[in-house]
Amino acid sequence: MLSEPEQRVLHEIERTIVASDPGLASLLTASHGARRRRGARVAHDVVCVIAALSGVLCLVLGQIPSGLAALVFAAVVLEVRRARFPSGSVRPTRARRRRL
């Protein structure tokens, strides 16, 4: 447990960091859960893209059943991603935050 003077110094350091570099401050205060969700969204995206590309490649090479199966899998992954991570929960990018 910090003493009261130490807590004041710590709060002053935090205010200085927030004032000097808000991006770093938000990164340091972001919850672990938010980072895990972002990682899960990226993983869903990667799996969906790989499955879609595999499906297209299979169709081009004449492997119709395999290609259709890969495309259906990509569609399922995309729908799962949309259900788990609705677009309203996506944080705005830095450029959009500056315009707001």
Image (cartoon, helix red, strand yellow):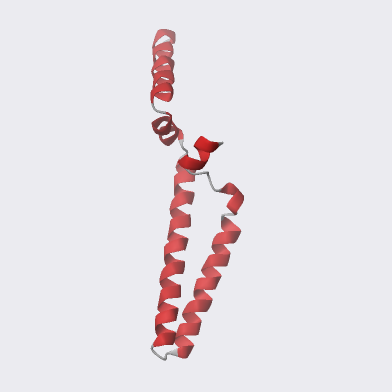
Outermost residue toward the front? 99
Outermost residue toward the bottom? 62
Residue 87 screen position, x and y as percent: 59, 53
Residue 13 screen position, x and y as percent: 38, 18
How many callouts does the rendering have? 0
Query: Which residue is at 49% across, 82% downward?
Result: 69
Check the image and report above or below for 16 versus 55. above
Closest to the observer, 80 or 54: 54
Query: Which residue is at 42% across, 15% downward?
Result: 12
The C terminus sits in image quarter: top right
Query: Which residue is at 42% across, 63% downward?
Result: 46
Closest to the observer, 55 or 10: 55
The N terminus sits in image quarter: top left
Residue 16 screen position, x and y as percent: 40, 19
Check the image and report above or below for 47 versus 91. below
Residue 81 screen position, x and y as percent: 54, 61
Check the image and report above or below for 22 versus 37. above
Q: Is residue 29 left or right of residue 81?
A: left
Q: Is residue 20 left or right of residue 89?
A: left
Query: Which residue is at 44% across, 57% downward?
Result: 42
Outermost residue toward the top? 5
